[in-house]
Structures are given as structure tokens and as C-alpha cells.
Amino acid sequence: MSVRLRLALTIFVTGLVTALGVLATLVIAFQRFEHESVYERANAFVGRVVDLHPDLLELHARDPDGFTGFLRNLLLYEPDSQLYLLDADGAVLAASGRAQPRPGFKVRLEPVRTAVQVAGDTRRAPYVMGDDPERMNSDAVIAARPLRRAAIQPGAAIAGYLYLVCQPPMLEAGRIAMFRSSLAGPALAGVLAVCALTTALALWIITAVTRPLRDLSDTVARAQREGFDGTEPVAAETTHGGDEFARLRAGFGAMLATLRSQWRALRQLDQFRRESVSNLSHDLRSPLTATVACLETLDRRWAGDAARADDRALVEVALRNTRNAAQLVRSLGDLALLDEPQFKLQPMTVELGEVLDDIVMRFADRAQRLGVQLTHDDDGAAVFAAVDIELFERAVANLVDNALKHTPSGGRIVLQARAGAADVLVRVTDSGRGIEPHDLEHLFDRFYTGSIARGGDGAEAGSEGGKGLGLAIVKRIAELHRGTVAVRSEPGRGTEVTLQLPQARRTAA
């Protein structure tokens, strides 16, 4: 869900909830007002009745049947109200309703006493709710006055109560129509007006707030899609009166401009590094080749001269290190070439099993001299991939060369190619001494010379010149093929290096 939609929903829901809350408040206030007005009339009516007829208990005692009619005559003005004569314990002595309570029926005295106290208190509650003996509920507005015997002096104990129950009027058709015209219509119009207002505010806020964010997100997406080379800098807004978004836009523009500048500087430095390495490799290749040729000549001349045995041993050491240096120089040049952005593969769909057979044949003599069994595990299924044959052979050859240097006599090296659902896995597995865990994460770093790089002859064993460039070249070749390289190893239990390459289907001739 976008920011715009979230903002719109938030504002709309807030406005709707506010409108409904206002409507609910109006309904509650109207109900409270109705209860208060009913209570005021009821309280005034009960007071007038007690003032005019202070001998209600005596009247009831003289004529109980006639007293019921008397109460009914008092309530001709309000059909939804009922009068009750209570004794001091709350028992109903007489009632104005047609349905008379059963003998001994009592109402709760707490609301009655509260109504009596409220009647003479200026800081009273707005109304009192109590029991309705006729409808058997406790949500009726009540009013009450205490009654005393006429023969007893004022201030004596209360002998009973005059109890008035006022039910809210039923919603008749006319009253419902009046409610709709006076409350429902304006309330609905108010809700619609609030919703319209919140929608307009949402549109305005969305436009004002999200436009700068949209511009920034578009710029970020363009930078991600095209890189810093194809991204134009955000126009800086340096006005002092700008809001937070203007300052954010200006800061982002400045940051992007700095990143573009640093990116150009890094690219220039990287280009200079590649050119320098390539030129250095080219310049050193000829003198190193000449030095190797001279040392080989001296070695051949002194081959049969016993007096030159010590000199020949020194020449062999110099010749071995010079050859390693020449190989390192060539690897540096090749790696610089592979790093060139303009470098293009020359892919060709081939059957990888045949390529692995050729590599096994190439290293067969060396593996036999070292006492290592080198085999190709072929399950008979043809595995095809679109690869640059020269680079692919070089990557696998580097892995085999490195495995030979770390596998003791009697060990085994196995080459394997398997096809997956969408990729090809080429594995080189050896039973050598393995790699320490702390060296695994640096295995494909350039010029890394940890414990993985030490061969048995005292020289570093990274196949391309002995400085860790062999595995770095393998990683770069895998990346050029849109693949990956991974290694799994345990000390003393061998190593398995896996090249993962995209699979290619064999096309009909």
C-alpha cells in the first residue's frame, strides 16, 4: 500500500469516526436532556401533590379502593407516569396503574432516598433512576417525597413515600418523523459534510506532502536502475523559507551530487589501476621471459658439470621463482583484462562432460607423478551450458591445479558436472588437508596468502603465480558467466568447490 493511499485512508477514517462520535454525543446529550426535563416536571409535580395533600396516608387508610382512583385522577396529564404510595420499608400500598403489584411487593429504597435528598439539594444530580414496579425494570426516571402521619409532630420518623415513576415516551409514528426531521436529517447531513471535508483535506495533504516524496523516490529508483552515471542530480532548493520537505530535497540532492562525484573519482581510480596493472604486466613480461631463458641456458650448461653443482642449485631456485613471478605477471594482466567493463565473453553451448574429460587428460601425467587419482565422475547424462570455453577450462584447471597442490599421495580428486532445474553445477572435490574455517571467507580474495595458500614445496600454492590470484580469477570467470562459486571444506577431510552456471538447452542441428 502506497503512502498516498495510507494517508487518504487515515484521514478519511479519522473524519468518519469523528462524525460518528459527534452523532453519538448528540444522541446521548438528547437522551440526557430528555431525562432531566422529565425529572424536573416529575419532581415539581410530586412536590405540589404533597403540599396539597399532606394526609395521603390517612386518605389511603380510610378508603383504599377509592385512593387508587384518586391517584389516577392526579395523573391525567401524563399517561406514561405512575404514582405509588409506599410505606416506610418500600412496600407498595397503592398504585395508579391498571396492573396492581402483588401484595407485599417492595421497591428498592436506595433510589427513593436518593430522590428525596436530591429534591432539597441545589447541588443535586440532574436526575435519578429507579425501579418501575409495573414494567419490572430499573431504568425509569423517578421522583419521591417523604410522608409523615398528621397526628405526629413535625420532624418525626418517615411513615411512607409518594413515589412517581416516569418512563420515556414510546416512539410513535409522529414522534419518529419529528426525530428524523429534527435530528436524523441534520446529523446525516453533518456526517456527509464532514466526510466531504476530510476527503478534500486528504486530497490536499496527499498532494502537498507526497509530491516531494514521490520525486525523491523516482530519483532513487532511477539511480538504482541506471546507476550514478545515468542519474541527474536533484535540483537543490536552498531557500531559507522552505519546509522540511524542501530541506530534505536539498539535502538529498547534495548527497546524490557528492555520491556522483565520488563514484566518478572511484571509476577513474579503478580505470587507472587496471591500466597500470595491465601496462606493468606487459612491461615486465618480456624481461622476465628473457631472464627465464637465460637461467634455463645456464642450467643446461651446468647439467653435467659436478663442479657447478652448487651453482646449479642456486640457478634452479632462481629459475623456479622467476617462473612464478612471470606467471603472476601474466595473471595480473589477465585479471585486469577480465575486470574491464568492455570485456565480452564468447559463449558457446558445449557439453561440459567432454570439457572435463579434456582437463583430466591434461593433468593426468602430473597426477600420476604425485600419486593422486584424478577422475571424472560421469553419470552418462549430457550437461549443456553456454560458456566461454577458454575461460571455463581455465577456471576448472585452476581448481584442479590447486587441488593437486593440497592433496597428498594416495588421495583422490573428482570432477563432476550435474544439471539442475535451471542451472549447472560443476564440482571439483579433493581428499586433501582441507581449509581452516577462518580462511574460508577469504578464499577468493585477491592476493590473500593465509594458510590455504601454502604448498608443500615452500612456495605459495595459489595456482596463478602463487599469490591467491588463481581462485580470484575463478570467481571473476563465474561472475562473467552470471554464475557463482562456493566452497565447502573441513580440515583433514578435503575440499569441495562448486561452480554454479546458467543451464543451456541443446538446440537441434
Image (spheres, helix red, strand yellow):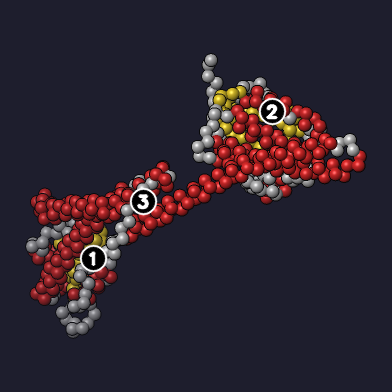
The image position of residue 135, as x and y in percent, is 22, 57
Is the Cβ of the residue at disc 2 closer than 8 Å to that at disc 1?
A: no
Rendering coords of residue 179 (x, y %): 13, 54
Q: Which amino acid, mark 1?
A: Met
The percent position of residue 351, horizontal first and vertical second, equals 61, 23
Q: Mark 2 or mark 3: which comes first in sequence? A: 3
Q: Earlier in the sequence, mark 1 or mark 3?
A: 1
* Distance from Cα at disc 1 to Cα at disc 3: 73 Å
State the separation of the CA atoms marked 2 and 1.
100 Å
Residue 415 lies, with reference to residue 10, above or below; the image says: above
The one nearer the camera, 80 or 275, is 275
Which residue is label 3 attached to? 233
Query: Can the viewer see residue 469?
Result: no
Q: Which residue is mark 2?
A: 359
Nearest to viewer (mark 1 / mark 3): 3
Q: How many marks?
A: 3
Res 339 visible: yes
Q: Which numbered disc covers residue 129?
A: 1
- Within 10 Å of the Cα at label 3, are there few (<14), some (14-19), or many (20+) other Cα atoms? some
Residue found 70% across the figure and 43% down from its top: 325
Q: Measure the alpha-carbon separation of dots 2 and 3.
A: 52 Å
Report the amino acid beneath label 2.
Ile
In the image, 118 versus 225, the foreground residue is 225
* Amino acid tagged 3: Pro
Question: Relative to 51, is 343 on the left or the right?
Answer: right
Q: Is residue 369 left or right of residue 122?
A: right
